[in-house]
Amino acid sequence: MNALLNWFSQIGSITKFGLMSIPQRRAAVTATIFGIAGVVAVLVGVLSIAAGFRRVMVNSSSADAAIVLRAGSDSEMVSGFGRYQTRLIADAPGVARNAAGPLASAELFVIINLPKRSTGTDANVPMRGVEGAAVSVRDNLKITEGRMFEWGKNEVIVGAGAAREFSGLEVGGRVQVGRAAWPVVGIFTANGGVAESEVWTDAKVLQAAYNRGDSFQSVYARLESAAAFSKFKDALTANPQLSVKVLRQSEHYAEQSEMLTRLITTLGFLIAFLMAIGAVFGALNTMYSAVAARTREIATLRALGFGSGAVVIALMIESLLLALVGGGAGAGLAYAAFDNFRAATMNWQSFSQVTFAFAVTPQLLVQGVIWATVIGLLGGLLPAIRAARQPIAAALREL
């Protein structure tokens, strides 16, 4: 027991002397801290893009909601139904009902071009034609400014994200649809979901504007409960009059986000890895300079009975503490700079813009600190081993 306490005391003493010598090495120490902070800030910042995009998709779904596409479709853009088919879907077992009928909305999805507020360049913005049940099918959809569009009229309401990102989408503005300009009469929120990136209007009006006859591309349905999904899906897939792909909304939006989140995550880790190599060399340089400056001190301690193991552990702790300072600084910088930063990006499944906010989550901050820890341990290991292996007599003779 006494030996163990003595060993910890040795580690504490060596670590204390090392930290007290930092002012003499402040240039190298500062460079190392900034290098590690940069790695963490970039990693967390890039991954917050994927986290924010994924959050938008997750917020777009609920456990008791489903979407029906044509069989083989991977997005609404390539799906298609006639009126008769959408009625069969709406009347399927498991669909919730209210006084007005089934809570199912047959919808039309088109792309319009609108200029971005930030750059003035045109971008693809999703425009959705909906039916009366659309509001009941979505969670927490609220008109926050203006009013709902009137059915049968060339009017639109706009998601809050689209209104922030694109020009002309404020209440009183106009949206060019074909040859006509349709007035914006309201702005809505949808719990931060993907619907906030869209422009909505009456499906029948949109069908006429685009000469789509009585066709739709998807059916959104509210189910009696989450457990009713299997009954709903089995009824539709067993119906010989239909050829459909039935998904929970959560599954559909997970598919929609998969390509982009995988790309961003891969790039984020690649960039961070390349930067981390430089940060490790910075940490190596700092710790080697610390060992060089304290060669006689370390040799004296070992001559007095301090173990080589205690020297290694103490130098590793010093390197780790510097890395944690850098990691904490980088995590704080990433949170201040990126959290809730609003942007828009392309959803490659639908080839349209999705507005979202970067999300610096606690998990990302922890991940960044873990990277800093690994950099610190790698940067301190070789110098610590070198310090412990130096011959005591030779080290004492150094000036």
Image (cartoon, grey):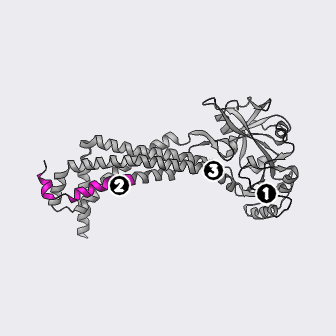
As drawn, 63 above or below 169: below
Identify the residue at horizontal 82%, vertical 42% (top origin): 203
Q: Of helix, strand and loop, which one carries label 1?
A: strand
Report the Cα–Cα distance between label 3 and label 2.
35 Å
Label drawn at residue 255: none
As shown in the figure, which amino acid type bears the numbered disc 3?
Answer: Ser
Q: Nearer the viewer, residue 293 or 266?
A: 266
As shown in the figure, which amino acid type bears the numbered disc 1?
Answer: Val
| Image coordinates for residue 8, horizontal then vertical, percent | 26, 62
Our reading of the magenta stretch's main secondary structure is helix
Label drawn at residue 378: 2
Q: Nearer the viewer, mark 2 or mark 1?
A: 1
Mark 3 or 2, nearer chain start = 3
Identify the residue at horizontal 67%, vertical 47% (top origin): 349
Mark 1 or 3, nearer chain start = 1
Q: Of helix, strand and loop, which one carries label 2?
A: helix
| Image coordinates for residue 378, horizontal then vertical, percent | 35, 54
| Callout 2 crowding tier (Cα within 10 Å): few <14, some 14–19, many ≥20 | some
Could you say which quadrant of the image residue 244 lies in?
bottom right
| Image coordinates for residue 17, horizontal then vertical, percent | 23, 51
| Image coordinates for residue 362, horizontal then vertical, percent | 51, 51
Q: Which residues are magenta?
A: 374-399
Q: Quadrant of the N terminus?
A: bottom left
Residue 386 in magenta stretch = yes
Residue lying farthest to the right in this orientation: 84
| Callout 1 crowding tier (Cα within 10 Å): few <14, some 14–19, many ≥20 | many
* Mark 3 lies on residue: 257
As shown in the figure, which amino acid type bears the numbered disc 2?
Answer: Leu
Q: Of helix, strand and loop, which one carries label 3?
A: helix
* Mark 1 lies on residue: 244
As drawn, 333 above or below 316: above
Report the Cα–Cα distance between label 1 and label 3.
21 Å
